[in-house]
Image (cartoon, grey):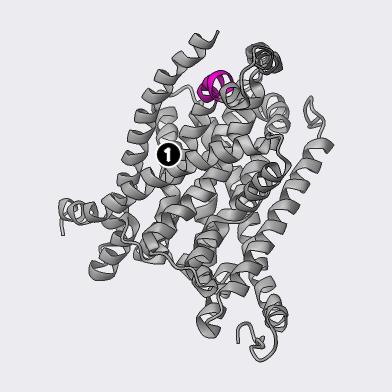
Amino acid sequence: MLFGIHWDTSGTTLDFALSILPILLIGLKVTIEATIFGFVLALVLGLVLAILRSSRFRIVSWMAWFVIEFLRDTPLLVQLFFLFYVLPLYGVSLPALVIGIIGLGAQYSAYCAEVYRGGIEAIDRGQWEAAHALDLSRIMTYKDIILPQAIPRVIPALGTYLVAMIKDAPLLSAITVLDMMAASTIIGDQTYNYLVPLSIVGALFFISTLVASFLVHKLDRALPKTGIPMK
Amino acid sequence: MSVYDIFRTLLNGLQITIELTVLSTILGALFSFVFGVGKISRIRIFRFFSTAYVEIFRGTSLIVQLFWLYYALPLLGVSFNSFVIGTFALALNIGAYGAEVVRGALQTVPKGQGEASLALGFSPWQRLVRVLLPQAVPEMMPTFINLAIQNLKDSAIVSLISLTDLTYYANNLQNLTYDTLRIYTVTLFMYFFLALLMSWGLGMLERYLRRWKLQAR
């Protein structure tokens, strides 16, 4: 029994599969929640990193570079363990799911930062000069001129990372988050049948990534290519 | 325990991590070429099989694939030791991403060249190996390097099927000493330097392979 739902091991494989499906769907909800919140965090944090990376102060841009490279080049699983075991030592005790979201968000913020940077650098230098000539502050230039043009162009690349993040989300089961992956191994441990739950989980991931790719594609088509008018 | 002691203990796990990464990257590259070529092959069954492979392994999660091979495969009567399972899971996963890269790079070679080699009486194999691949390989290298580093990072999850890699040792050490901050910091830095080393080494390979492109012109 998991989430108050019993499984049926007396009938056929199909009966068993149907009886565990609701449990796995509850797990899928956790996986999707983790992905959505993690991705929002990655989008925000990534933008901050990208802007710091192109700072005029060399020390700031160097530090942002190091953070991006370090987050990108180390395994998500170890980052998750780090957060999971280290944060409580400093009195920060958060639910495992929140730690997982922070971990996902942190790693993907590094990927997003690189994507944003590509988008920002693709904007013509003359626009910066024009903004400077019009006496706009750096913040205003980013907010009103650069980002509205840069972001629509990078949506497809960011979308790829959203899809990738869905597939990384089951790693959260390693830090005790009760998601779809954890649910399937618990069912496997108790019924000695791993084949059915793991195959269903595989299928659910397949469907989730398909749906996500489709939505990203739709969003990309819906956005104006030249930029989002801010006012 | 000093940081040096932690580092020395973790070195035990480094071997498995490196072996696993190197083997699965090479095997994954092989899968990339076979199925990447398969995706644009004229033989329908090969094309169908390659497309199915790429879609399935890209659409599902690596950890699901790993657990499936580790827990579910024995129920079907097939079992391997966990090192083989880990290597194949990583290779199959990275191979599916690589196959798309190979396909993309092969398609950037101008169509006329394929037709020209056909006119010159090259066999399909000769056309692939002597005309298309030498020009396509340098194109793939940057993405391949990223995939190889991705593979190094992904290799950490084999610790979940109790392979004694770097992450496994880190977790064990954590359970023994609770010296959490230093253990995981050292572990992260070890992965970081491995990744830097890999991208440096593969960068040299990339520069070496670039000459194929010049030769082909």
Q: Quadrant of residue A182?
A: bottom right
- Residue sitting at 68 percent across and 34 percent down? B40
Magenta range is: B129-139
Q: Quadrant of residue B22?
A: top left
* B111 magenta-colored: no
Q: Is residue B173 left or right of residue B109?
A: left
Q: Is residue A191 left or right of residue A227?
A: left
Residues packed near mark 1 inside 10 Å, few (<14), some (14 to 19) or many (20 plus):
some
User: Which residue bears the numbered disc 1?
Assistant: A67
* B138 magenta-colored: yes
Label 1 sits on a secondary structure element that is: helix
The amino acid pointed to by label 1 is: Val
The answer to whether A91 is drawn above or below residue A152 in the figure is below
- Residue sitting at 79 percent across and 31 percent down? A228
* Image coordinates for residue A115, horizontal then vertical, percent: 59, 33
* Image coordinates for residue B50, horizontal then vertical, percent: 64, 45
Q: Is residue B82 visible?
A: yes
* Image coordinates for residue A102, horizontal then vertical, percent: 52, 55
